[in-house]
Image (cartoon, coloured by chain):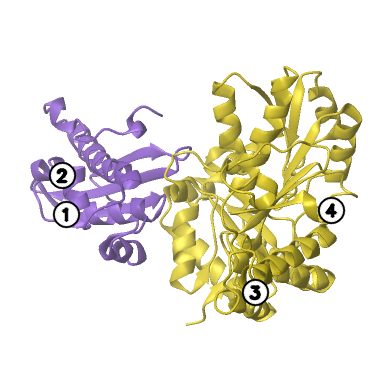
Chain colours: A purple, B yellow
Amino acid sequence: MAYSEKVMDHFANPRNVGKMDDADGVGEVGNAKCGDIMKVYLKIKDDIVVDAKFNTFGCASAIATSSMATELIIGKSVQDALKLSNKAVIEALDGLPPSKVHCSVLAEEAVKAAVADYYEKNGIETDSELFKCSGCCSSCDKS
Amino acid sequence: MQKIYVDNAATTAISPEVLDSMLPFLQEVYGNPSSMHSFGQAAAAALEKARADIADILGAQPKEIYFTSGGSESDNWAINAALALGEKKGKKHIVSSKIEHHAVLHVLERLEKEGYEVTYLDVYENGIVRLEDLEKALRDDTALVTIMYANNEIGSIQPIAEIGALCRKKGVIFHTDAVQAVGHLPVNVKDDNIDMLSLSAHKFHGPKGVGILFCRTGIALRGLIIGGAQERSRRAGTENVAGIVGMATALKRANENLEKNSAALTAMKDKLIAEVLKIPRSRLNGDKEKRLPGNISFCFEGIEGEALLLSLDMVGIAASSGSACTSGSLDPSHVLLAIGLPHEIAHGSLRISLSEYNTLDEMDYIIEQLPIIVQRLRNMSPVWEKIEAGGNL
């Protein structure tokens, strides 16, 4: 098993790492028992994700997928952020080993959870179908 | 950048003496040991000299030594051969421990599916089985006890001589996976009451792909590979002469330097442990005293082992982790779970395994780098954030 150069770059120099005190939406997914937890913070202005930050407990690919996921959604509309798929994260990282695909699913879920939190805080009603995860991963079954 | 190799439980570098002893058997003395001519007989003589030298060091007879491809093959062979003997007497029970290498554990798991019953002994917090548990586990239909000499992840050393004595008293075959022990501890099959033992050359500066199964006279060893008279007709196939000669050289060298190396490794190990445990929320896994001289196993709360391992590699330190993420499963090491660590702590494991080629200066470098890396990963960990805030995991 080897990581792509992009994965190693995002692991060694993660983008947007850190916390956000005035976040408009926060999402945390995964659990420590399985070895991955991702927490994503969003700053949203006029329906645009103007900033995103993350904190991750997990392996190199968990850190790299969180980093890439935040990169991919900054500047996008909230609706587009919701459309972020784990496949898009994998592609942007030039691939992930098969055993690490669940990390990309977790990154997608973390973004969706943060948007859900934003909608809830602001009383925005939406179609729950939008929040369904595109991947399939045992992380969904465990809590 | 400095390059430091501290993954010697995975494999070691071949020593210059070992390499020198092997080269003639790759070039000049290339005969097949089964051939009658002088080329063949020169190779056969080297093979038998290696067998005698190794037997002498282990306290065995030369005819009790079978050359194999390494530890995993020897483990598989020993277990299956012992059970073939038990089968004849209707014995279908095996006793082992919860922290065996997968070369034993996965064989046992398959046997369970095939109708065998296995009792896995607990190892408690220090990673060591208890004799009273073994005594309770032994039954009239126990065909085999297989318990490793020393653990590959946490270095804990089992009471092998006592286990062997108990098995002998009860008339049960005792096999030990001594892959991590031979060359590092004074292993003697007579003193330790061992019936079968597996070892691998590349764990003590010998070549990869060669090892031994010791099987005591009186235990009929069922053949593994059929089709030739090699290894007393029990393992057919032209012998890996250069590898076997290299293994004998490596074992002789390790045995001669055992005390010296053990003292040097212990000094490095003790220094590293004392300094690294200053990192808050860190712990040493395994027994403090009864452990391999070169094995160090840590857990750091709030971070994950693979990220730690790769971060160390980026600053030139090659170590290992028992973490799930390096094995491709979500579950952390069965060894760390067996000593009672919760999943979330077991995920943050790091194994540093030393050899005679490491130095105290290298330990200083690790001591300097490790806390920086642990802190960097903790700074981005939501789990650490909770720990710091006083919450539980």
Q: Which of marks 4 and 3 is nearer the N terminus?
A: 4
Q: Earlier in the sequence, mark 2 or mark 1?
A: 1
The residue shown at (78%, 49%) is B64
Do the residues under discs 2 and 1 have CB atoms within 8 angstroms?
A: yes
Answer yes or no: is residue B47 visible: yes
Mark 3 belongs to which subunit?
A: B
User: Residue B363 — which label?
Assistant: 3
Q: Which residue lies furthest to the front in this view?
A: B37
The residue shown at (44%, 57%) is B307
Of circles 4 and 3, the one toward us is: 4
Residue on which the image places disc 4: B60
Of circles 2 and 4, the one toward us is: 4
Callouts 4 and 1 in the same chain:
no
Q: In which quarter of the image is residue B137?
A: top right
Residue B176 x %, y %: 74, 44
Residue on which the image places disc 2: A84
Q: In which quarter of the image is residue B259?
A: bottom right
Residue B374 x %, y %: 52, 61
How crowded pointer 1 is (Cα within 10 Å; few <14, some 14-19, many 20+) is rated as: some
Of circles 1 and 3, the one toward us is: 3
Mark 4 belongs to which subunit?
A: B
How far apart are the two marked residues, 2 and 3, measured between alpha carbons?
45 Å
The residue shown at (51%, 48%) is B323
Mark 1 belongs to which subunit?
A: A
How crowded pointer 3 is (Cα within 10 Å; few <14, some 14-19, many 20+) is rated as: many
* Amino acid type at mark 4: Ala
Residue on which the image places disc 1: A72
